[in-house]
């Protein structure tokens, strides 16, 4: 419980210490070691009334942050209901040595009869990471006599080094259900103390801490659901309910969100302009790469291709020693990048902006937060969240969003984590909040063409060509970029084999298109022992050898979280079965499921001709985020997909045909 | 040496992923400046070695040289120097450029350096200070074992990487192991043991042909192996150490009788361990009071045993705290009782104390959680990683349902019980302890005892279903599963480890494995926490379109649920045996009420296969409008040697085909 939160804090702190620099916090502090009275009704509690069938629940939790004195205090009271819930009796609290320490650990177990077993064991200190002079440690202790029915409670203080100052927050949502919780924060004090602001995330309504008489801000919360893990959900930490605090210097004028971003835009725009301020170098490259007669889009594509040829250091996995030995220099401007022909993601995209501008286009940097990590929340007023960037180019009144630094992504195609996200466009007018284009399912297609022959023993063999296009191709190219042909064969073979039923084996005979920009084509032979099953004198032939993996994810009747695919996608299959000599199709499934409208569409259509059965199948998942209220409908569609994929044709053997 | 007697099953260390994380962190924090360095001659010499032309194309790396030199001092302390030179042949072999070394306060690393020789010949060098350290993620609650990770620059295809480190050890037991076989080919491996004057050694080759050492006048012995084939990891294979080659060595001081040449026997190891645990199992008034309370209603010794074993198994939480000798020596029974937690040997200690208070004797039994590791011919404490208890059964206790009983001619009737296993009741044994050895530490010396493999009929799954099929192909029905032995343990583990509210999801997931479209209408488990009773699971389901309507036919697959295996596990390219977890007998009996107006047109033929290791039969019959389908599957032996895999493959193929087979119903003309 404290574990994940603290790990996050430690990494965040580590980052703050090393990258952002740090400020102070004064004075020490003490912890209140008083235990709260125990309600007999809690001792008698057999289950969580708000979420019956729980292993454990947090009856009460208190977190008090003292920004002035650089500490926070945690208090947990947890009711254990089951054997499996006993695991909460092991407590782990990570911290960064030299920057923080865990103090005043107190713990006790309250048996169901009310008798108390104080914690008198040892608190251990584990070394989680020791690297480069930094140590992340963990205080661990285990509660005595933890049995179903008991209550465990513990409290501790995390004391930070007062020479450091840090942004902080409350993780209000734990993995366990929380019945009652009190959160409070004492803001920095003194004439030079920064002002404190807060925003809440992952909650339906903003949590507004209320100023107390003593100057603290506090909020009391009840019945906070625990986080539930499910397939196809947003990353857990993006969903977790939390309140973030941030601090502003008292000498900075108060800013609205709009003012903050305007100021950021000014700063960043100026920095970009400075970096691009090598007009003649840029124009020289434009002249080399493009022809005056080139239509605008052709020009832009040529510049995109030129920039993609620059060595992208962000993709390289070398040790510091190797970097130093290579004597790579810091690029101070686009001319350096062009001359040295290497750079990091943002430098490469900046070169593209410069070249596009030099060629007469309106081109701007767009900062964004990739959606596999976080969502951009302008209200947080934190520009460091925007650690990814793409380029917006205006062409004939149309916006083109491009990321030439993304290796293997052709002109017009963005990596999925940069699609459908909010970003901040840098310009000379104060910046604009924009949204990148939503991904289209036609940008990620897998096409499978199978020419298969069925044997009388039910085994299937033949050839399969799989075309990966769009994001599917670029993603595979990126993932496999450091691998050799053997490794690529193994990985792609593993993926294709994972689509097959038991007994199925796909062996790659040919791969093409690794360098793009067209489809990545994987060809090979397929064998499936016992694919068709004998049924007396007949044989039953499943319509497709490819299994849809989504089906099993949506088996549960209910769901808590929204459904989140990384990107929309399509599958197009054309499967041709040549039947064994003398066999004919006796009958085909009559009521094949199909969905021809809506955000997820599916069809499967078999057609028999002579001794060949041809099956065409299409699956089109058009969205990437579906509210949980749509779960029932999505589940139903994927059940149809499973049902349709599992349909069988009945074949008549020469013997049975004769008998008929 | 690694810690003994405390490993729990299913604990795995994700070293590679964690290493990347740590080393990534180390890079962020800044690592030292580039150095131009010289590599030692042993490395540069090995790097010149030509690779055999016979190396398969997909080999990711090859060990050119691996050296292990153990120097034993007169006080028994050891200093071992490890050297290794690897050539990376493919990008997937890059991780061979990360050195990962386990160490503790007892086994510190006193020297560490690593090098790489890239294609341009400019050597990179990194040292101990460049390494990251971590406590083992996912290990015990607290122990002092750590992992040191050192990333070697330029660990790229075609380059040679090498490292050298020295590790000290103040061993509790005088043992050494040479693990020379890897996942990649090893061209040359050398092991040297240097003993003080007068000391002797004994050795045992495991999973490899025996080789004699070259010896020198200075009591130094050297073994060298060339061209060692890699171990290929396969599904359902025996544990790594049961197949990979190694040399186990123990050495003796002439001055110490316990480590004399005659010592080191199983008997002496038992004596050593008995001395280590002496007084740990002394009872306390609190323990005595608990025993009195637990056994107040017990009329027989067996009832007392059942009450006490159940208490320790279920009330004492597994928490391992192991520091120094704590890896070997349990906490006192009093401490374990007071805290209500402990590791395997702690739980054994408390259980022994409580049984003693109830008038029942018992012995510590050192165990190994994987089968095939312990070599009876070579006594060694290094092979144990777990502790269970051998309970001396009074002669009048009937053993009818106590399948974990061994009647030892010397020690008498011993009932083995593992209090760390959360779900296996007294009378049964966890699967990996069956057909395995334990060292029973009796007061007059240890004795290696072979634990039996429990009969198939003791590990039972019975599935009985009544279904109705409609003319539209919809299937409705109810199923009762009755499980005991291993299948019950497996189900209890599954159902008790999730929150009660999530248990129905487990049934959902199970049905989803076999059915495309279904609704679970009700589900209930029985005897979930009554470990001495059969576990039952009842559920009612509806599966629309289960039977496929095709023209005037309905295609019905009678094997609605359950899968007994796939021929894939016995592939013809396998190098190692297939290992089943336990012997088991599983039966399905399904009745289908057929839709009105339909009759059976085609029935699959009955199946009967028996390859000795497994047997299977299925058959159909029709009574009126009810179709009966019955099948039974039995695993008789848990290890299938490579030479017998073709038979197993054929049997599993027949089973898989039967599981796919369908009955054809035809609309009746009248």
Image (spheres, rainbow, N blue to C red):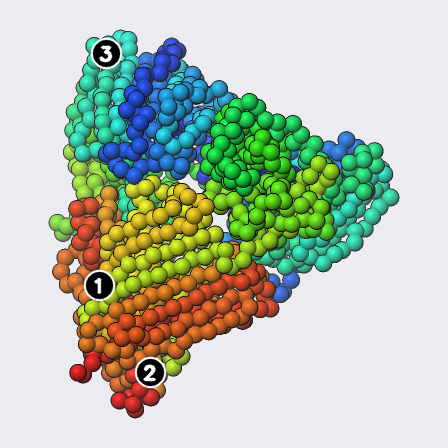
> Both on one chain, marks 1 and 3?
no
Q: Residue furthest right?
A: B217
> Both on one chain, marks 1 and 2?
no
Q: Nearer the viewer, residue A168 or B596?
A: B596
Instruction: Kindly report the distance in space between the C-alpha atoms of the residues bearing marks 1 and 2.
Output: 26 Å
Residue picked out by circle 1: B544
> Both on one chain, marks 3 and 2?
yes
Q: Is residue A130 above or below residue B608?
A: above
- Chain letter belonging to callout 2: A
The image position of residue A624, as x and y in percent, is 23, 50
Residue picked out by circle 2: A537
Instruction: Kindly report the distance in space between the C-alpha atoms of the residues bearing marks 3 and 2.
Output: 85 Å
Residue picked out by circle 3: A215
**Crowd tier of the residue under label 1, counting other residues whose Cα lies within 10 Å: few below 14, some 14–19, many 20 or above:** many
Mark identifier at residue A517: none
Q: Quadrant of residue A64?
A: top left
**Crowd tier of the residue under label 2, counting other residues whose Cα lies within 10 Å: few below 14, some 14–19, many 20 or above:** some
Q: Can I make out residue B175 in this image?
A: no
Instruction: Kindly report the distance in space between the C-alpha atoms of the residues bearing marks 1 and 3.
Output: 63 Å
Quick check: marks 1 and 2 in contact, CB under 8 Å? Answer: no
The residue at the point 55 percent across, 22 percent down is: B285
């Amino acid at each position: 419980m404290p574990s994940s939160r603290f790990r996050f804090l430690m990494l965040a702190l580590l980052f703050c210490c090393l990258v952002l620099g740090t400020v102070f916090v004064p004075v020490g502090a003490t912890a209140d070691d008083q235990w709260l009275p125990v309600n007999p009704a809690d001792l008698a509690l057999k289950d969580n009334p708000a979420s019956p069938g729980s292993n454990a629940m947090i009856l009460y939790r208190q977190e008090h942050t003292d920004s002035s004195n650089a500490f926070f205090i945690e208090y947990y009271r947890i009711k254990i209901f089951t054997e499996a819930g006993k695991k909460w009796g092991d407590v782990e609290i990570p911290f960064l040595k030299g920057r923080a320490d865990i103090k005043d650990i107190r713990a006790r177990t309250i048996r169901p009869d009310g008798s108390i077993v104080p914690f008198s064991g040892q608190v251990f200190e584990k070394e989680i990471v020791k690297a480069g002079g930094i140590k992340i440690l963990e205080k661990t202790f285990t509660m005595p006599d933890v049995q179903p029915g008991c209550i465990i409670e513990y409290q501790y203080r995390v004391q930070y080094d007062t020479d450091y100052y840090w942004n902080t927050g409350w993780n209000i949502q734990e993995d366990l259900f929380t019945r009652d919780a009190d959160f409070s924060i004492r803001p920095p004090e003194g004439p030079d103390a920064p002002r404190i602001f807060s925003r809440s995330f992952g909650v339906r309504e903003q949590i507004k801490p209320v100023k107390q008489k003593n100057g603290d801000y506090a909020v009391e919360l009840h019945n906070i659901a625990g986080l539930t893990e499910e397939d196809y959900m947003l990353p857990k930490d993006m969903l977790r309910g939390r309140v973030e605090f941030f601090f502003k210097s008292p000498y900075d004028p108060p800013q609205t969100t709009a003012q903050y971003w305007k100021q950021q835009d000014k700063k960043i725009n100026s920095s970009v302009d400075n970096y691009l301020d090598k007009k003649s170098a840029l124009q020289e490259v434009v002249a080399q790469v493009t022809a005056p007669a080139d239509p605008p889009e052709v020009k832009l594509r040529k510049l995109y291709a030129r920039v993609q040829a620059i060595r992208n250091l962000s993709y390289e996995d070398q040790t510091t020693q190797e970097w130093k030995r290579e004597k790579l220099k810091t690029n101070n401007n686009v001319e350096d990048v062009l001359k040295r022909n290497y750079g990091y993601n943002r430098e490469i995209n900046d070169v593209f902006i410069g070249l596009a501008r030099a060629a007469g286009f309106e081109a701007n940097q767009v900062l964004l937060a990739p959606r596999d990590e976080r969502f951009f929340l302008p209200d947080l007023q934190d520009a460091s969240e925007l650690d990814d960037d793409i380029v917006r180019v205006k062409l004939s009144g149309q916006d083109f969003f491009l990321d030439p630094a993304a290796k293997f992504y052709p002109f017009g195609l963005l990596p999925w984590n940069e699609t459908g996200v909010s970003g901040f466009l840098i310009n000379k007018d104060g910046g604009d909040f924009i949204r990148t284009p939503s991904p289209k399912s036609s940008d990620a297609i897998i096409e499978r063409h199978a020419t298969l022959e069925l044997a009388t023993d039910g085994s299937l063999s033949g050839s399969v060509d799989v075309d990966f296009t769009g994001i599917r191709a670029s993603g595979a190219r990126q993932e496999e970029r450091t691998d050799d042909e053997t490794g690529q064969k193994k990985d792609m073979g593993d993926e294709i084999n994972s689509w097959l039923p038991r007994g199925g084996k796909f062996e790659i005979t040919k791969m093409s298109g690794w360098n793009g920009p067209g489809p990545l084509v994987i060809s090979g032979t397929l064998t499936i022992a016992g694919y068709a099953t004998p049924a007396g004198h007949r044989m039953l032939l499943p319509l497709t050898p490819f299994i849809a993996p989504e089906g099993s994810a949506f088996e549960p009747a209910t769901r808590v979280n929204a459904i989140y695919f990384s990107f929309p996608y399509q599958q197009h299959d054309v499967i041709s079965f040549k039947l064994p000599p003398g066999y004919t199709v006796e009958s085909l499934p009559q009521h094949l499921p199909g969905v021809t409208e809506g955000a997820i569409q599916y069809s499967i259509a078999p057609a028999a001709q002579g001794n060949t059965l041809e099956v065409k199948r299409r699956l089109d998942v058009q969205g990437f985020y579906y509210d949980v209220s749509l779960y029932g409908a999505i589940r139903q569609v994927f059940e149809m997909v499973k049902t349709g994929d599992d349909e069988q044709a009945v074949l008549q053997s020469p013997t049975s045909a004769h008998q008929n | 040496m690694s810690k003994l007697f405390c490993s729990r099953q299913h604990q795995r260390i994700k070293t590679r992923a964690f290493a990347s994380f740590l080393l990534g962190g180390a890079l962020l924090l800044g690592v030292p400046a580039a150095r131009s360095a010289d590599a030692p001659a042993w490395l540069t010499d090995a790097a010149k070695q030509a690779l055999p032309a016979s190396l398969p194309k997909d080999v990711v790396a090859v060990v050119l040289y691996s050296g292990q030199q153990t120097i034993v001092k007169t006080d028994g302390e050891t200093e071992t120097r490890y050297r290794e030179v690897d050539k990376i042949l493919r990008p997937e072999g890059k991780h061979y450029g990360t050195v990962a070394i386990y160490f503790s306060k007892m086994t510190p690393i006193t020297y560490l350096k690593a090098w790489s020789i890239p294609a341009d010949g400019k050597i990179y060098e990194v040292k101990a200070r460049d390494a990251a350290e971590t406590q083992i993620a996912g290990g015990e609650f607290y122990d002092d074992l750590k992992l040191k990770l050192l990333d070697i620059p330029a660990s790229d295809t075609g380059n040679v990487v090498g490292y050298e480190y020295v590790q000290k050890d103040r061993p509790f037991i005088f043992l050494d192991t040479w693990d020379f076989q890897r996942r990649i080919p090893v061209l040359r491996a050398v092991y040297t043991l240097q003993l003080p004057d007068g000391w002797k050694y004994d050795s045992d080759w495991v999973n490899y042909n025996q080789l004699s050492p070259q010896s020198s006048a200075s009591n130094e012995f050297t073994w060298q192996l060339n061209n060692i084939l890699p171990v290929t990891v396969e599904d359902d294979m025996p544990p790594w150490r049961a197949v990979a080659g190694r040399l186990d060595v123990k050495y003796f001081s002439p001055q110490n009788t316990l480590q004399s040449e005659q010592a080191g026997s199983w008997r002496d190891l038992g004596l050593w361990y008995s001395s280590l645990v002496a007084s740990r199992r002394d009872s306390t008034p609190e323990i005595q009071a608990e025993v009195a309370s637990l056994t107040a209603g017990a009329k027989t010794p067996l009832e007392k045993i059942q009450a006490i074993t159940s208490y320790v198994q279920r009330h004492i939480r597994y928490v391992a705290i192991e520091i120094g000798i704590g890896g070997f020596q349990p906490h006192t029974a009093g401490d374990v009782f007071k805290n209500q937690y402990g590791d395997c040997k702690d739980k054994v200690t408390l259980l022994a104390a409580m049984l003693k208070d109830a008038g029942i004797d018992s012995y510590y039994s050192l165990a190994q959680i994987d089968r095939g590791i312990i070599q009876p011919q070579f006594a060694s404490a290094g092979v144990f990683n777990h502790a269970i208890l051998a309970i001396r059964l009074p002669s009048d206790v009937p053993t009818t349902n106590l399948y974990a009983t061994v009647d030892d001619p010397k020690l008498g009737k011993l009932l083995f019980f593992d209090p760390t296993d959360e779900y296996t009741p007294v009378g049964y044994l966890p699967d990996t302890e069956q057909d395995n050895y334990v060292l029973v530490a009796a007061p007059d010396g240890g004795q290696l005892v072979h634990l039996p493999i429990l009969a198939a009929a003791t590990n039972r799954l019975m599935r009985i279903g009544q279904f109705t099929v409609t003319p539209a192909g919809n299937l409705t029905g109810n199923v009762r599963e009755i499980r005991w032995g291993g299948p019950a343990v497996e189900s209890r583990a599954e159902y008790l480890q999730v929150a009660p509210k999530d248990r129905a999801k487990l049934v959902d997931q199970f049905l989803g494995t076999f059915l495309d479209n279904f609704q679970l209408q009700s589900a209930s488990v029985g005897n979930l926490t009554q470990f001495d009773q059969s576990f039952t699971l009842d559920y009612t389901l509806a599966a629309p379109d289960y039977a496929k309507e095709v023209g005037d036919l309905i295609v019905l697959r009678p094997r609605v649920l359950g899968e007994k295996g796939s021929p894939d596990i016995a592939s013809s390219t396998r190098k190692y045996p297939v290992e089943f977890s336990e012997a088991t007998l599983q039966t399905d009996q399904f009745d289908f009420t057929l839709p009105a107006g339909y009759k059976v047109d085609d029935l699959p033929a009955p199946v009967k296969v028996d390859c000795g290791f497994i047997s299977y039969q299925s058959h159909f019959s029709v009574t009126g409008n009810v179709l009966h389908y019955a099948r039974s599957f039995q695993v008789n032996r848990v290890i299938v040697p490579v030479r017998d895999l073709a038979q197993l493959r054929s049997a599993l193929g027949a089973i898989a085909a039967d599981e796919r087979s369908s009955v054809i119903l035809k609309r009746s003309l009248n």
